[in-house]
Image (cartoon, rainbow, N blue to C red):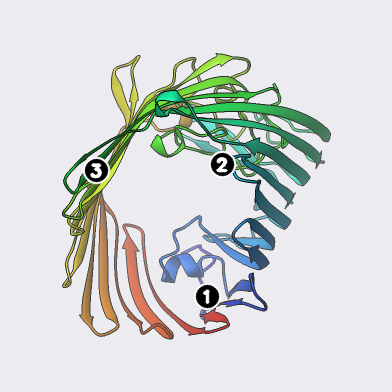
Amino acid sequence: MGTVGDRDWRGAIQVSGRFTPTKDWVAGWSYSLFSDNAYLSDYTDVAKGDIATNQIYGTYLTADTYLDARAQHFNTIGNYPTDDPAQANTLPVVKFDKVQDLAEGYGRISISGELLSVYRQANQATTVNGVSSVTGYEGNKQHLELEAAYENQWVLPGGVTATPYLGARLDAARFDGSVPPPPGYPAQSDANLLSLTPIAAMDLRWPLMATNGGDTHLVEPVLQLVYRGSSATNVGITNDDAQSFVFDPSNLFSYNRFDGIDRQETGLRANIGGHYLGSFADGSWLDLVAGESFQLLGTNALGVTDPTLVGTSTGLGSTASYIVAGGQGSWQNKVFGAGKVQFDPNAMKVTRGGLTAGFNTPWFSATGSYIYLAKNPALGTIADEHEVGASLSIPVADYWTVTGSYLHNIGTNKWASASAGVTYDDGYFTISGSGSATPTSYGFGVHFGLKGPLGSVAF
């Protein structure tokens, strides 16, 4: 009662298309039309608070060039009487990357860039367990980012590989805001920014290889030095696309860990760690990575928070970071597993971790998972979080598959979600039906799609 779904007739139509108008180009769209903003969260597996995106796009992709341009309108899903005015639209967002290999032995040149145009009709602010943040300011923002770089790889005596990187990044941003944020939140007024960041890095690796019959072992110590010569960390003025990241083995050896262009790392940083890769005669393999990062000079952007709270308690804000480690592997292409952990050496405790394991056979595939997140009052997480999950997929006939999943919150000793579905896919036509539930909602959905030589259409 009292929700936007309290009406006699409810429904939704979702369509999407994807075509190949010419070689190397893909164009498409997606569009959702619904009677009320809560319909998709009530009757499909879209979680409350998620987004349905209306967009048109074009993408160009070759071996050395990528270009993607989109115009996007985001519909906030949930108990909203109308579209949420605090939800931004991007009109447009354009990204490109170009890599040009030079003559053999002379390295490569890379050029990348992004134009982000954000339009928002109201401030977007939240408070979780007494911790406030602003994830969007009312106003219009344009941010252009361009980066060019040269890199090469040298093999030094003893087999050490050295990869120097020299580049520069240009940021030009403008924000036009007219309404102040709610009391207690940081203000953001009209502003312009022009920033040039020189970048220099050196990646040193010493690959050591050993073989034993059909088994191969690679041990690789890694040292990186990365310098970004700027103190401007909020290069987008407002932070619309770099609002979160998790420090883990996947970005341990990264030159810039922010996931968008509105923030950037600064100063001199050293990343130190090691990599092991084992390949075995029976088809099994094991891949391990571990290490730590150190801020040596300059402003540590990962310790500078902004109104979105990115930079708060990332494990990278102090001179010495948390230690991260992870691994994945497979045994005879039947059993597979992966795990990663984030460890605070000062407090001598695990701050984040996860495990996944599964089993594949011709008759079924099963996966289990465990996720741990230590409490972090600075982000509004006031208690340790533990979740376990399981999923099962069973092919029951040609082209037919039955699936199911379950997620349980150990901390509250309550189930968090469950789902089940059936799918038919013969490579040309696909149709699936699924049902999902949480302790507060449930829903059902049907999806079908057509595939052809020039593209696909889904409903």
Give whichever of discs 1 and 3 has the lower sequence position: 1
Is residue 360 left or right of 4 when viewed as pictured? left
Tell me: residue 89, above or below residue 413: below
**Mark 1 vs mark 2: in front:** 2
Q: Which mark is residue 94?
A: none
Is residue 107 left or right of 178 when viewed as pictured? left
Q: Amino acid at mark 3?
A: Thr
Closest to the observer, 428 or 354: 428
Closest to the observer, 378 or 427: 427
Q: Secondary structure at mark 1?
A: loop
Residue shown at 34% from the left, 74% from the top: 434
Q: Amino acid at mark 2?
A: Asp
Pointer 3: what residue? Answer: 216
Say if mark 1 contacts mark 3, CB within 8 Å.
no
Pointer 1: what residue? Answer: 7
Tell me: residue 173, above or below residue 87: above
Q: Secondary structure at mark 3?
A: strand
Q: Which mark is residue 259?
A: 2
- Compute the Cα span from label 1 to label 3: 65 Å
Residue shown at 47% from the left, 58% from the top: 48
